[in-house]
Image (spheres, rainbow, N blue to C red):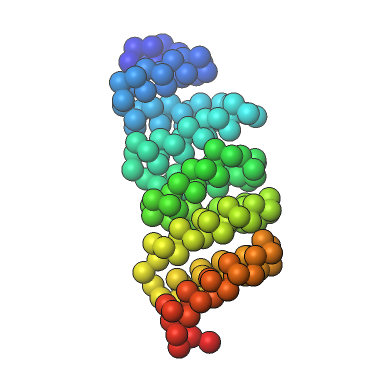
Amino acid sequence: LAVHALDPERIETLKTLDRLYGLQEDWWNQYGMLEKLLERLTGPERLEIQVRMGRLLEQKLGDPVRAVETYREILVTDPGRAEVLDALEGLVRAGEAAAEAFAVLEPALAESGQWERLYVVREALADHEEDVVRKVEHLMEMGRIAAERLDQPIRAFECYRQAFLVDPLRD
């Protein structure tokens, strides 16, 4: 676009191009504009750009692994950012880069004491898991969370029972 050639350094020019590329559904060029904006912005506005980049990677560009990395970077600056936690949870539930998303999501939820949410997300991960050893590990950890963090011994027992049914020979 000719506008970009005139003044590629102006933030307002980049924001206009960002909007235009979005309207045209030209996701790669929109992502490129967001990268350029990211280099020039600080503070809350920079975080908003990062969130948009993560969403673009996840929803339009088909790159959930890079989206997870972008979300991880955001959580370093803003550990409790709800929309990022929600996006990571969505990736786990959808089974897209689930292990990578969970590796970022788990410590954030644990640090903020969101034990019920962590239990539910781990349950979704266990439901998708085909590897018996990892599935049992998830169920055992769910049992530990239920017993120690949620004070729900019956729920914990059910997790341990399911783990036994999945792999009765495991210690």
- Looking at the image, which residue is at 36% across and 69% down? 130
Residue 169 position (above or below residue 11): below
- Looking at the image, which residue is at 54% across and 75% down? 160
Residue 48 position (above or below residue 14): below
Q: Nearer the viewer, residue 24 or 34?
A: 24
- Looking at the image, which residue is at 56% across and 59% down? 119
Q: Nearer the viewer, residue 45 or 101?
A: 101
Q: Quadrant of the N terminus?
A: top left
The picture places residue 116, in percent across and down from the top left corner, at 61, 55
Q: Is residue 69 visible?
A: no
Q: Is residue 129 visible?
A: yes
- Looking at the image, which residue is at 68% across and 50% down? 112
Residue 105 position (above or below residue 126): above
The picture places residue 100, in percent across and down from the top left corner, at 47, 56
Q: Nearer the viewer, residue 55 or 156?
A: 156
The picture places residue 171, in percent across and down from the top left corner, at 53, 87
Residue 141 occupies quadrant: bottom right
Residue 29 occupies quadrant: top left
